[in-house]
Amino acid sequence: MPLLTPGRRWQPIYYPFRKEKLSHSILNTLEMLYKGPLWGCRQCGNCLLQETAFICPMECPKGIRNGPCGGATEEYCYIDKTRPCIWHKIYERAFKMGRQERLLEVLPPLDWELVGSEQIGKLVAQVKKNGTSKVIRGLTSSDPVKRKVTWDGIFRPVRQPDWWQGDAEYHAPAYTEPISGLEAALKTGQFVVTAEIQPPQTSATTKLKKNIEMIKPYVTAVNFTDGASATPRMAAVACSTLAAQQGAEPVLQIAARDTTRVALQSDALGANPLGIQNVLCLSGDSNKLAPAPQGRLDILDLDSIQMLWILRRMRDEGRYLDGREIKFPPKLFLGAAASPFASRPEFQALREHKKVNAGAQFFQTNLVFDPDRLDIWLNELAKRNILDKVYILIGLLPLKTFKVTKYMQAEIPGVFIPDSIMKRMEAADAAGNAAEEGVQITLELIEKIRTKQGVHGIHLMSVGWEEIIPRIVTEAGLLITGAP
Ligand code: SF4
């Protein structure tokens, strides 16, 4: 037992005196001295500066290390409106510097044992491993390819530990037969409808079961949100299990906000036995939106891209995050959220590209009210050559009142409602038929969206108005033959 054990808050002050090799102490102090003032470094133990256009991603209040969340805007971070979104800044600078493709590399979650430790020693060790004279020759070579290879040979092994080995490549699923009914329907080219049911804020399941029964014949799969708006509701895994028991196909949403690397892998193993094959990974609404008292904002153990990477490798390589073999790997059809209008379409497309590379097989997008603007995003995805690698379901919300319309426009990041729809909803609200107008708008949007190349279906988010789903599906002509 050491003589002095400072409180956790005061530990950093004692770091220079902690029991470690003198060389480490010197390098740690040196690194803090120059990286602190230059980049606001907090010594995460795995420096990503070269991949993030020399802006430290740990400035992100959610601690996301693989790109912006769906709430990113050009103007500000939606969690802290006094600051810009650091990921927007990273993207902006990377595009200016021509380093945007470096943002595609899937970066690992933190190894918390290394937090607070320096990088210089690891880099020096890597130089020695590669042969100091060879490194010097490579770095001073007139051949830019040789210089790059030498440079990467030093930094990549430090940045990408053996248990992660992230890259910027697309990894096709290692199976051919569809894993789920949703995947099967998408593969046959059917224009698919999925819908969201809000898990109840109670332990009673009567209404939930009634809603599942009601919409089951009209949709291919039913999503269950995971603590939407950071508010406690019945667990998505419980709702998904009930849906499977009722013969509906569930899409289990897992929010990074409430998961950890252990919980995610455990959930993945438990999904199939419960009848769950579709899993949608997303960052989740920030605790900022939660009812008070507010939880920590910056403790994401994983981001949604890391979740996809882990689940894909569990399924296709039969490996846990730590590399151990899984005897019976889970079979999962993996989805992700996409946000076409959150910031510039080329930025969003890059983010979606990275998700596809990491393992996303289908996207359910944020709410879309402007199909023309959607084309710009789809074009950007086409330029990235990913439209044939991912199924896209466009998120739609039947507006019920003008109040809801205004709220969506003003408060939900990434949602853009054109003036024409705002005016229609305002007039309809004044005339007392806003809900009917909302339905008509949704039907018109479906009509425009279903012809777009690269779109494979719609995802209805009714936010508690589940009764409207059968009508919309029927009137849009999307009812599958055989349903009521
Ligand atoms: S990425 Fe990590 S090591 Fe690099 S500057 Fe940011 S906090 Fe420091």
Image: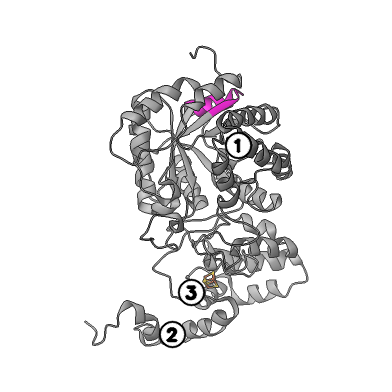
Tell me the quarter of the picture where residue 95 sits: bottom right
Report whether residue 327 is seen: no
Q: Few, some or many C-alpha atoms within 10 Å of disc 3 (few <14, some 14-19, many ≥20)?
A: some
Tell me the quarter of the picture where residue 132 sits: bottom right
For disc 1, the marked residue is 430
> Vertically, is 377 above or below 14?
above
Pointer 1 with pointer 2, Cβ within 8 A: no
Q: Position of residue 296 (x, y in %)?
A: 40, 63
Q: Position of residue 314 (x, y in %)?
A: 43, 44
Q: Secondary structure at mark 1?
A: helix
Label whose residue precedes the other's in the sequence (1 or 2): 2
Label whose residue precedes the other's in the sequence (1 or 3): 3
Tell me the quarter of the picture where residue 100 sits: bottom right
For disc 2, the marked residue is 25
Structural distance between the alpha carbons of marks 1 and 3: 56 Å
For disc 3, the marked residue is 43
Residue at 52% x, 51% y is 305
Q: Which mark is residue 36?
A: none
